[in-house]
Image (cartoon, grey):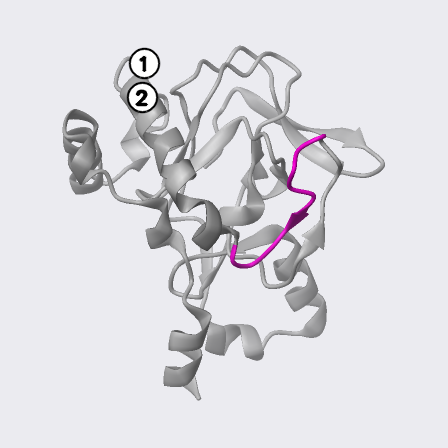
């Protein structure tokens, strides 16, 4: 579920639609949680989908560490990519704002940690990265782990509107990791090991 203080708006011809804040979303806010309404498609199920449905799934879903495609049931599926994202996934099935997000500003993710199937060129943001690759998470997870550890303590300082969607055991583990940063799970855990999984399937 996406944060309630958001809505979908047309962003640009290049990006199409995206998710923007309707009120200030402070740094440390939980901006999205994977919940029970999100649809999870196994590799086997994906192979049997109607091609039109498969195309929609390819556009609006992300691949989790198990190779399953996750389709958000709400506006979360419209969150765009950025090399300077305002939100960040953490390996506890939720996302956090890594800076203050002001009204009318986009909520964005770095698709580099979402296990894209094929490389794609992104909108030029004057960063050294110009494209997103399937193995980005293998190359950048160490610096992304630093981003998570730097921002995680802010999560505990705020009242969180989405906290009831996080399983109690998951939240307890996250809180413990905030107080003991060495136990914080790495974003590398979100990586889908394609070769390992494919060797099992085929």
Q: Residue at x 42, y 62 (%)?
A: 192
Element at label 2 = helix
Q: Residue at x 58, y 12 (%)?
A: 102
Asked whether 85 falls inside the magenta stretch, the response is no
Range of magenta residues: 126-135
Q: Do the CB atoms of the residues marked 1 and 2 lie less than 8 Å apart?
A: yes
In the rendered structure, the answer to whether residue 91 lies left or right of residue 103 reads left
Q: What type of secondary structure mainly makes up the magenta span?
A: loop
In the rendered structure, the answer to whether residue 41 lies left or right of residue 169 reads right
Query: Residue 173: x, y in percent?
Result: 17, 38
Number of marks: 2
Q: Quadrant of residue 55?
A: bottom right
Element at label 1 = loop
Q: Relative to the observer, which residue lies in front, 58 or 111? A: 111
In what quadrant of the picture does the C terminus appear?
bottom left
Q: Residue at x 45, y 37 (%)?
A: 1
- Residue 148 sits above or below residue 48 on the image: above
Query: Residue 60: x, y in percent?
Result: 62, 51
- Residue 36 sits above or below residue 40 on the image: above
Dot 1 corresponds to which residue?
158
Dot 2 corresponds to which residue?
155
- Residue 159 sits above or below residue 31 on the image: above
């Amino acid at each position: 579920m996406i944060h309630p203080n958001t809505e979908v708006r047309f962003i640009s011809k290049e990006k199409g639609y995206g998710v923007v804040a309707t009120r200030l979303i402070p740094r440390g806010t939980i901006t999205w949680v994977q919940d029970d309404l999100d649809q999870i498609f196994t590799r086997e199920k994906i192979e049997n989908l109607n091609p039109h449905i498969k195309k929609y799934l390819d556009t609006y879903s992300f691949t989790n560490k198990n190779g399953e495609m996750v389709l958000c049931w709400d506006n979360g599926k419209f969150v765009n990519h950025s090399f300077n994202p305002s939100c960040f996934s953490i390996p506890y099935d939720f996302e956090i704002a890594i800076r203050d997000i002001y009204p009318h500003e986009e909520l964005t993710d770095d698709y580099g940690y979402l296990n894209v199937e094929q490389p794609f060129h992104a909108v030029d943001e004057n960063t050294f990265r110009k494209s997103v690759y399937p193995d980005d998470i293998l190359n950048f997870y160490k610096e992304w782990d630093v981003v998570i550890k730097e921002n995680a303590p802010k999560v505990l300082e705020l009242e969180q509107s989405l906290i009831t969607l996080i399983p109690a055991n998951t939240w307890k583990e996250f809180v413990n990791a905030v107080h003991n940063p060495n136990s914080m799970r790495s974003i590398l855990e979100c990586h889908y090991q394609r070769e390992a999984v494919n060797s099992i399937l085929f």
